[in-house]
Amino acid sequence: MDRRSPGHGGRGRGIGIQLQRRALQAFRMSALFALAFSSATFLGHQWEPSRHDHINHRADRILSASLGSFHPRRQHNSLHSSSHYRSGMNPNTNADVAPGFKRWTPAAGSKNWNALRGGSYAGFGSQNSQGMALQQQQLDLTSAALSLTSSSSKAEHTQRLVEILNNCMNPNHNIRTQAEGQLAAMVQGANYPAFVSSLIQVMLKEDSPIPIKQQAGIYLKNTISAKDEQRLRMLQDRWIGVPEQTRSEVKQGLLEMLRSEQPRVPQLAAQVIAKLFAAEMSIQGWPDLVSSLTQLVGQARQLQQQQIGDSKTDGPKKDKSTRLGIVALTTLGYVCEEMEEDTALQDDVNQALTAIIASMQGPDPDTIYSAVNALRNAIHLTGRNFEVPSERDMIMKMLCEAATSTEHRVKIIGYESLALIAERFYGKLAPYMEAIYTLTVQSLQRQTSEPEDDEVAVVAIEFWSVLAEVEDDLLYEAQHKTHRPGAITISGATDSSEKCMNYIKAVAPHLAPVLFNCLTRQDEFDDDAWNSAKASAASLELMSRLVGDSMLEYLLPRIQQFLTSNNWREQEAGLMALGSILDGPSNQALEQSITPQLLSLVFNMLSYEHVLVRDSAAWIVSRLAQHFPQSLAGPHEDATMQAIFKCLEDKPRVAVKALGTVYHLARHQIRSKRMNRQSAMGLDKYFGGLVRKLHVVSERADAKDENLATVAYDTIIQLIKAASSDDMAVVEETVRHAIARAQQTTKLPAGVSLDIKDENEILQGQLVRIMEACLAVLNPSATVVYSKEIMSILLFILKSPNTAAHQECIRTAGLVAQEIGTEFSQYMTLLWPFLLQSLHETSSASTYITAVLAVSDVTRALEGNIYNFCDEIVSALLNALSSPTVESRAKPPTLSAIGDIALAISGRFIRYASAVLTVLQQATEFNMPVDEPESRALRNELWEGILTAYSGVLVGMRDASPAAFAETVNIHTGTMAGFVRKISEVFISGGDDARGLEDVVRAACGLLGDIATGCGPEARIQLQQPVIQMLLEVSTATQEFSQSTKDTANYARQAIYSRF
């Protein structure tokens, strides 16, 4: 597992998920080197794992068989320890509070800790009512008893269901399979209402074993819940279609189960209640649920208060009232989690918040934990409450108190909730920032060696990481006048560029050193663990992007001090800090800071005894190659290469960082070649040695560790792409090596294990990608030499079950066709079944796009010889264009492929012209929103594809008879010219909509020239319209346009003037 992974994404996720993501994404190298590992889930309760967990899997599998798709979601609940809790603990008022906070904390509205702690609260929504105190009246659930019939037939049906559920756990495969089939049949069609009714009766039977009840509850929950949105709507609609009487019986039974004293039963009922509430939200089918739950919470609190003053109250009664409150709060939290902010009733939200906040002020630690959990699940609903200062103050007060609890689990949820608030209500944070800073710094400075303290530190750091992400998004939006992809709109935010308060810049001089100290808390025995050291490094990286050059000022002296230390922890911490802040400062600041002496220290640490130090030193070199490659060039080139070769022989975790260095240097050289500029560090003189060494690394005995082999192959591919003309001998050597190894994979003996087969298939895909990269840079004459062996390997893999490598094979076959031209006809018949199959796999956009691009390659190679395959190709392409389920990104290459076919078969395209031109006309009428850069880029690609297809048809059809041309093409001249006018108006108007239009304008000019050259005199009126003429004039005069675009515009002008 690599501790350093790729860059972070935008906002819009729960904090628990963000912690998982940051565990995957801290210490980022490149997406290439991301290695997955799991992290603790923080959102929601979890059932305790048990020996009956296999029941959950089997229940899901049976429901999947009956409902058509697999739903793997299973939540487990682990509720409430009984450790002691002391409420109202004051934080250290002498804690380090950063000076300068007054510039972003309004004096009149500032909330220090003492202000947050004081006072009581009447209830949420009291601004508009006389106050909504908790309803303490006794909740009489006995009056809501089940109205199930006691007929013998129903009892027999329930008993039969118990037997079937029990058989689902039978170790005998035949018995178990038969039982699973019976359950699957019960879920279907008209049987469903009776099935759910029987499930609730099984759960209510006192004599039903706990595993049977658990399984029945899981079945019930999974009949109304799914991750997939479409399937979820189908399940919810089916539930709503159940007769009202049956639905009421089920809901009333679940409420009764909340009072059960049997293990797991109340928690299971809580989750099912929430899912049923979600299913009926659209029809307001359970309007009194929140009120019932808050009454139950109030009843439990009332009993607890009575028992506190009653010394005669025995333990079981106390336990019962406490358990009742916990279950009600847990259910309330689940229900809040299912609510949507824009559809939730504010009265329900107010009732829930009042009950939750009141429960957070009680003496019982388990109740407090459940209440804090419920509040976290309700934060997304508190938008209106955050507009009311007194209600906002109360929420923040209770969360800050939670963050100072002596209960670690309460602290953790308190900080997670504060991070959620930073994400959703950034604009409301100013009065509370000083208090939050004080709390988080205390948690970091008080940290001991206890694992629980480190968990608290992680979530305290997470608050600042989330805040940094929010501010990074806000600055992006202010600069680009649009939301960053993946970002959410902040509640209460305005369109003003001043909405970013620059909290991170203000706090950085004081918080960065505190985070730096946390870097020394490494776990040398469990590097997979997500701890405060890794969280601090991730947070420093985010902070560096906002603070820039100043981060070097704040941390570089301590980094240099730690790098010269004799303590390995300090050395590794110094390296981690340096690597974490490289992404923020300017190149000029880095040039002044990354001195030869500092670089020498880093290189020396590559030989250090402790592997963590070597690992981090290798990572630093990789980061420098990614962000500041010139620091490794010049006099440092040889030392850098020596370090790389040394690290490639080290442990896999170190070697993979060295591969990262080579990868980034190769990528930098590729970019420099595209821009016709000198690379900061040329690899040509090391090229042969590096490629050969990487082949050795890929075949190491431990190459599976840290994905070393995969990264080695990916790095070879980047080196091949960066190769110069002087490196072609090594490239040919590489393709021969790949062919030889691939041929060995085709001779796998029979009877090998599945693991060996899987590894062999992965290797085949990697070797095919290397062959593809080599063919892309070799001369066509060299490709001809190797084409027969390569095609033999590709066809072997395509015939095998190794579907994972099929896309690579199709893509490489297209490249072979492109290089050897008409000679490819000898392979086309063999390739055709696999190519056609991929064309029909439109449900997988990547598979389909690969096939379409290969069709274009093969069409251009075979020219007219492609005609015999065109019926099925054109049919597949037109179906894809007309299908609403095919992803939009798949349609531009489809349009281009049609143009290639028309050019290749020329006049014979008359067979398809009418259908194709009709579809193209429909495409020109399609309008899509372009308010985001991604949608604008997709629109431009679609426009370019339509223009390319039109040009292909016009040019290809010139060989058709004049009558056929006039009948099929001329009648569409007005549509073509109208489409160009539409593009011209967008381009000439300027603004955001006109961004990135050069390729579209070039294709439009080309089409105008083709219309003038191929169409009749009736096109004259269309082509001489002012907006068309202006397009051609502006295209030739725009300095930013390439010479190719200007030449195409001149071609169109000359064609129009010479013809008309």
Image: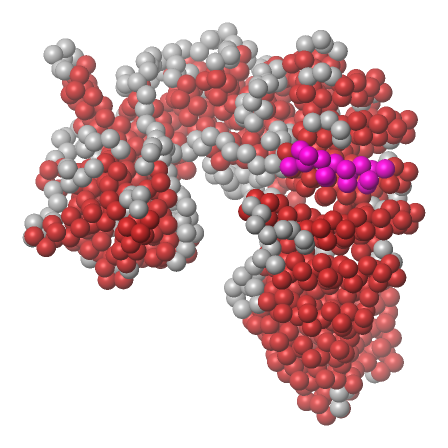
In the figure, 120 relative to 3: above or below? above
Residue 144 place in picture, x, y as percent: 13, 42
Q: Is residue 910 above or below residue 448?
A: below
Name the residue nearer the viewer: 831 or 206: 831
Question: Is residue 293 a member of the stretch shown in magenta?
Answer: no
- Which residue appears farthest toward the left when viewing the image? 151
Q: Is residue 778 left or right of residue 398?
A: right
Please say if 782 is above or below 425.
below
Q: Residue at x 79, y 21 (%)?
A: 603
Quick check: is 703 in the magenta stretch? yes
The one of 294 and 195 positioned closer to us in this rendering: 195
Quadrant for residue 580, please give it.
top right
Q: Please give the count of numbered marks on the rendered protein.
A: 0
Q: Magenta span: helix, strand or loop, mainly?
A: helix
Query: Which of the pair 160/907 is nearer the observer?
Result: 160
Compared across the picture, whether 834 is left or right of 720 comes to: left
Furthest residue to the bottom?
963
Q: Is residue 300 left or right of residue 697?
A: left
Toward the right, the furthest residue is 726
Q: In which quadrant will I find the C terminus?
A: bottom right
**Residue at 35% from the left image edge and 46% from the top image edge:** 58
Q: Quadrant of residue 319?
A: top left
- Rendered location of residue 605, percent (x, y): 76, 18
Q: Is residue 852 above or below residue 130?
A: below
Q: Position of residue 959 (x, y in %)?
A: 78, 85
User: What residue is shown at x 47% (from left), y 8% (from top)?
Assistant: 93
**Point 85% across, 37% down: residue:** 689
Over which residues does the magenta segment extend? 689-704
